[in-house]
Image (cartoon, helix red, strand yellow):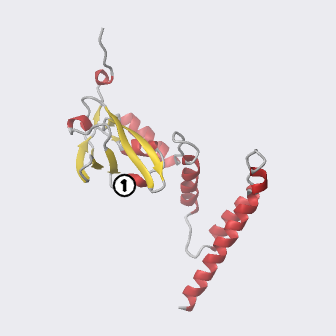
Amino acid sequence: MRASRWSLLFGTALGVVGTLAVQRAMPEAEAGRGKPAQLDRQNFHDSLDLVLDRHVDPVNAPQMMARGLKHMVAGLDPYSHYLTAEERELARKRQREGAESGLVTALHQGDAGSELEVVAVIPGSPAAALGITAGTKLLGIRDRECDQLLSNMEAQLLLAGAPGERIDLAFDRGRGRETLELELAKTKADALVEGEL
């Protein structure tokens, strides 16, 4: 019992120190003068070192940094994203494989998390064959909940793969949560072009 009190006290102290360091690094006085506050990198590094060195449990530093960078870049605008080296390699692999679901999506960030909306479905695609339409809310892809996604790029990586690969989708078409299995296929070029003369 005594150890848990010390852990609680230490965790609280660590939180206070980290908050004070960040506040000191970004003075409000400069923000009020019409120019963006400059981040004192040394204070940032000191705060990061404090968390890494003194957190109660062991911290996976590369994983924590990657997640932090993802959140920072996702906060810039709806189009920016940060991919780790492993994710970039996966993107190259899935591009070479060339199969996809046929879903064009948009990620909307909200206070309760992200919402992934289908904005278009490629005609003749696996998604079109299953009756998925624009306006459908995707709730999960490959057992990953969409409200935890930080960028649309993450969604597109989950929706691509090898021809014949099957992925699980959870979605809401206004009738509650539904799930189905979708088989990825290469998109035919003529399905992407429509027109009349």
Which residue reaches farthest top? 197
The 10 Å Cα crowd at callout 1, few under 14, some 14 to 19, many 20 or more, is some
Residue name at image x 73 percent, y 56 percent: 26
Q: Viewed as shown, does residue 146 lie left or right of 124?
A: right
Q: Is residue 26 left or right of residue 134?
A: right
Q: Is 109 left, or right, of 125 in this rendering?
A: right
Tell me the residue at 51%/41% (across/down).
Answer: 78
Residue 184 position by quadrant = top left
Residue 105: horizontal and vertical position, in percent?
A: 38, 39
Kind of element beneath mark 1: strand
Residue 118 occupies quadrant = top left
- Counting from the top left corner in percent of width and height, residue 80 is at 54, 41
- Nearest the viewer among 120 and 72 is 120
Q: Is residue 64 above or below residue 174?
A: below
Residue at 72% across / 62% down in the picture? Answer: 23
Q: Is residue 177 above or below residue 76?
A: below
How many numbered marks appear? Answer: 1
User: Relative to residue 92, is residue 75 depicted above or below?
Assistant: below
Residue situated furthest bottom in the rendering: 2
Q: Amino acid at mark 1?
A: Arg
